[in-house]
Amino acid sequence: MYKTILAPLDGSKRAEKILPHIEELGMRFEARIIFLQVVEPVPLVTDAAAPHAVHPQTEYADRREEAETYLAGRAGIFKEKGVTARTRIVGGPVVEGIINTAESEDADLIAIASHGRTGLTQVFYGSVAAGLLHRIDRPLLLIRSQ
């Protein structure tokens, strides 16, 4: 049924709540799992009080390196269990990064955990799940992380 499952992660325990679900799907359907992390650009902040602040490009490179290490660890755990897994890191806005990766990897399913915010909290903080629901053209497995 599913051949390629895209699993966006952000390094949080909340996001990792999807892992048992995709592990089961990967085993059951012999699907490959693509672990994705979208690294957003670092804004340039000019502050005379902090003349030695980290340069945005350096911070962005550090974030990408952290993402590589984190995702490699998740993929390694899945590989040890016999599930085909690999990683992708992309830059840009999160929802667009997930959608573009799902298209380029021809993912059959996008699987994420959501914190389940509703109402004003969602309006003010935004929601990756809501953004995906309104824009994707493929199945979405969404589990509540709480």
Image: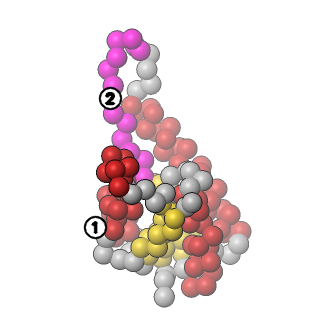
| Magenta-colored stretch includes residue 43 | yes
Q: Main secondary structure of the magenta part?
A: loop
Q: CA distance from mark 2 to mark 1?
A: 29 Å
Residues shaded magenta: 38-51
Q: Name the mark on residue 30.
A: none
| Magenta-colored stretch includes residue 79 | no
> Mark 1 belongs to which amino acid?
Arg
- Which residue is rendered at x = 35% and y = 55% of the image? 119
Helix, strand, or loop for circle 2?
Answer: loop
Helix, strand, or loop for circle 1?
Answer: helix
Left or right, 42 with respect to 86, comes to left
Q: Name the mark on residue 44.
A: 2
Residue 12 picture location, percent across and down:
56, 51
The residue at the far front in this view is 119
Residue 82 picture location, percent across and down:
68, 75
Residue 35, compared with residue 125, is above or below; it is: below
Residue 65, compared with residue 146, is above or below; it is: above
Residue marked by disc 1: 135
